[in-house]
Image: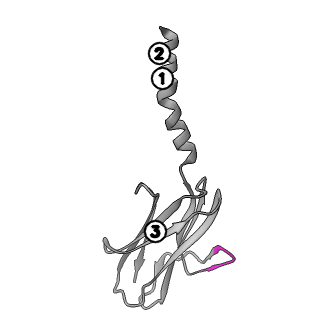
Amino acid sequence: MRLIYLLAMVALLLPTAVFAADSPEIMRCGFCTSIEEREPVDTPETIEQGQQTAYFFTEVANGSGQSLTHKWYFNDVPIAEIPLKVGTDRWRTWSTKQVWHLTPGTIKVQVSDTGGKILAEETITIQ
């Protein structure tokens, strides 16, 4: 009877362990002023009003063959949803948004997996 119970528990927990190992993990993410050689350049505390473009960089591990989404918000209103393919187990990617026309406020980017699970979130202020 104990053996059956033990096998049942292993059968229930094994899919969870396998899924967890395959879930993308965000290693780094954040706003930057540009990208050079697949790396973020300058990580500002704020964005100056009138700046042309905002960049959001993400480095992911364990995400080969999956997709991520950068969902951009301005003052908590969605303004863009950008799908990004993950090519290998360690992958660096980014998205951009034109921000020159935005008034002072808050930009937020949520990084989510294909199931919609939020993996990371960062905010920055436009002054």
Q: CA distance from mark 3 to mark 2?
A: 43 Å
Give the residue pinned by disc 3.
70
- Residue range corresponding to the magenta coloring: 35-39
User: As drawn, which residue projects farthest toward the top?
Assistant: 1
Total marks placed: 3
Answer with left or right where residue 109 lies relative to residue 29. Answer: left
Type of amino acid under label 3 = His
Which residue is painted at 65% across and 60% down in the image? Answer: 88
Callout 2 secondary element: helix
Mark 1 touches mark 3? (CB < 8 Å):
no
Which residue is painted at 65% across and 73% down in the image? Answer: 39
Answer with left or right where residue 23 lies relative to residue 114. Answer: right
Give the residue pinned by disc 1.
9
Give the residue pinned by disc 2.
5
Mark 2 touches mark 1? (CB < 8 Å):
yes
Which residue is painted at 42% across and 90% down in the image? Answer: 100
Type of amino acid under label 2 = Tyr
Callout 1 secondary element: helix
